[in-house]
């Protein structure tokens, strides 16, 4: 019986350790999302892979340029696509989740499967933290 109690105590201690480690990681991820480096290392690669072909460089389909924060916040023909701090009001998330309105489906990227849940969460965390990007570089 004594070994069962010891084993149970160990299990509870292990769960507490895992919980503390998980919460620390979650807090760290939220803090990082507010830094320009989070955009550069985590968000920009997602945009480069899935969005830049149509919404970067000289291409601005739908009037949307995603190269700078100012351009992204201005949005395209349908208006703003990102509302810093408010993922629920950010059209970009609706589109990358493939949850566009039935009468006007604009799933992004078009004609492809939706982004992974992990990539969508990364973009959501970035928007929630204020959609921070490094300053635009003059070209």
Image (spheres, rainbow, N blue to C red):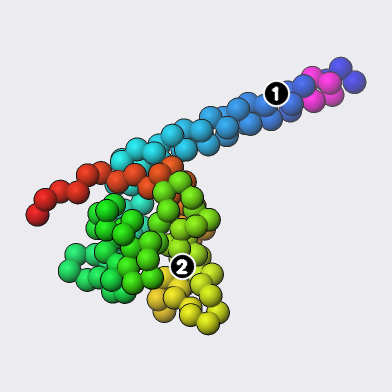
Q: Is residue 5 magenta?
A: yes
Quadrant where the N terminus sits is top right
Q: Nearer the viewer, residue 16 or 3?
A: 16
Task: Name the residue at 51% across, 72% down.
Answer: 100
Say whether residue 126 is visible.
no
Q: Earlier in the sequence, mark 2 or mark 1?
A: 1
Percent coordinates x, y for residue 44 in the rendering: 31, 53
Q: Nearer the viewer, mark 2 or mark 1?
A: 2
Q: Residue at x 25, y 44 (%)?
A: 134
- Residue 80 showing in the rendered view: yes
User: Which of the image's four quarters has the C terminus?
Assistant: bottom left
Q: Is the magenta region chiefly helix, strand or loop?
A: helix
What residue would you read off at disc 2? 95
Task: From this view, report whether residue 25 is shown above or below residue 58.
Answer: above
Residue 138 highlighted magenta (yes or no): no
Q: CA distance from mark 2 to mark 1?
A: 43 Å
Q: Residue at 77%, 21% (x, y): give it.
A: 9
Image disc number at residue 65: none
What range is drawn magenta here?
Answer: 4-8
For label 2, the crowd category at 10 Å Cα-Cα, with few meaning under 14, some 14 to 19 and many 20 or more, is some
Label 2, secondary structure: give it.
Answer: helix
Where is mark 1, residue-wise? 13
């Amino acid at each position: 019986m004594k070994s069962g109690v010891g084993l149970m105590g160990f299990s509870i201690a292990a769960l507490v350790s895992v919980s503390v480690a998980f919460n620390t990681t979650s807090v760290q991820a939220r803090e990082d999302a507010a830094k320009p480096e989070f955009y550069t290392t985590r968000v920009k690669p997602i945009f480069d892979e899935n969005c830049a072909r149509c919404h970067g460089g000289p291409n601005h389909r739908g009037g949307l340029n995603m190269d700078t924060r100012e351009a992204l916040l201005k949005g395209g023909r349908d208006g703003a696509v990102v509302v810093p701090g408010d993922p629920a009001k950010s059209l970009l998330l609706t589109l990358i989740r493939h949850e566009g309105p039935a009468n006007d489906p604009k799933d992004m990227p078009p004609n492809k499967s939706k982004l992974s849940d992990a990539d969508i969460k990364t973009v959501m965390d970035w928007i929630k933290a204020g959609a921070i990007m490094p300053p635009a570089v003059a070209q």
